[in-house]
Image (cartoon, rainbow, N blue to C red):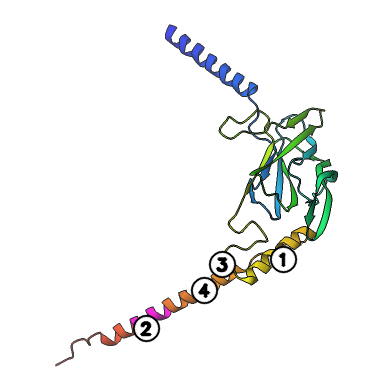
Amino acid sequence: MTINRTRLAAGSALTAATLLALTSAPAWAHVSIDPAEAPAGGYTTLNVKVPNERDNASTIQLELHLDPEHPVPSVMPQPVPGWDVEVTTAELDEPVEIHGSEVTEAPSVITWTGGEINPGTFQQFPLSVGPLPHGTDRLVFDAIQTYDNDEVVRWIEEPVDGEAEPDYPAAVLRLAEGEGGGHGAPAEGASDDAAGGDADADAAHAEGEPVAADDGGSDMLARVLAVGGIVVGAAGVALGVLAGRRPNGPTAG
């Protein structure tokens, strides 16, 4: 009986410690950017992913603060049903040239209101952004999440490579310097047609137009089907030759 009581006490202590750790530790989910990496110098579409971490309140507002040290001249939000969006701009310390025009201000804060992210769900807010800056390996986005119980969570702690993730990390977009210089700059050896296609895609992003999907998948499917037809035909010819060589059965005497 003493052994059973000891095991029960130990199990209760372990359960209590586990619950305490879970309640005191910060939530795992946080505001993030998807995809987490994009090529510098071009345009891309980002999803601001906002999970609701509370089981007794709904998220009703999100403020996304863009990196003030590395401005992005064009930021265009995609409408999200049920949500209103407002883009606040700020003057740039130095003008930036984009598509032949001088830009003196850039978006600084994007605010979504009017909707609701219920407990146990998340919401994505798409943004078309660009051109993404050179000269840095990341963009840091501070996010302020507001709940309908007046709780405000500030995701503003910048993660540091090689260190543990902070309790309330800011969203980070990694920037990759591609061999071709990012979108709009063809890779070495690329054809003029390919270069023109990339430029058209960048222009479409700049104007907020949808970019058509590449038809390379259709070409690949056609090639696979053609090769499959050749293989089937060759197999039929081989079977015909073998059938012609098969010896006849014995004949009656």
Q: Which residue is mark 4?
A: 223
* Residue 210 visible at all: no
Percent x, y of residue 125: 75, 46
Asked which quadrant contains residue 67, the reply is top right
Is the C-beta separation of discs 2 and 3 under 8 Å? no
Mark closer to the chain start, 3 or 4:
3
Q: Which residue is mark 1?
A: 200
In the figure, 91 relative to 97: above or below?
above
Please rate how many residues cluster around mark 3, counting C-alpha atoms within 10 Å: few if below 14, some from 14 to 19, many from 20: few
Frontmost of labels 3 and 4 is 3
Q: Which mark is residue 189?
A: 3
Is the C-beta separation of discs 3 and 4 under 8 Å? no
Image quarter (top left, top right, bottom left or bottom right) of the C terminus: bottom left
Which amino acid type is shown beneath numbered disc 2?
A: Val
Reply yes or no: does residue 187 show up in magenta.
no
Front one among 231 and 12: 231
Front one among 121 and 33: 33
Q: Residue at x 71, y 55 (%)?
A: 43
Q: Residue at x 57, y 72 (%)?
A: 219
Reply yes or no: does residue 236 show up in magenta.
yes
In the figure, 193 relative to 136: above or below?
below
In the figure, 70 relative to 8: above or below?
below
Please rate how many residues cluster around mark 4, counting C-alpha atoms within 10 Å: few if below 14, some from 14 to 19, many from 20: few
3D distance between C-alphas at marks 2 and 3? 42 Å
Front one among 58 and 86: 86
Residue lying farthest front? 94
3D distance between C-alphas at marks 3 and 4? 24 Å
Is the C-beta separation of discs 1 and 3 under 8 Å? no
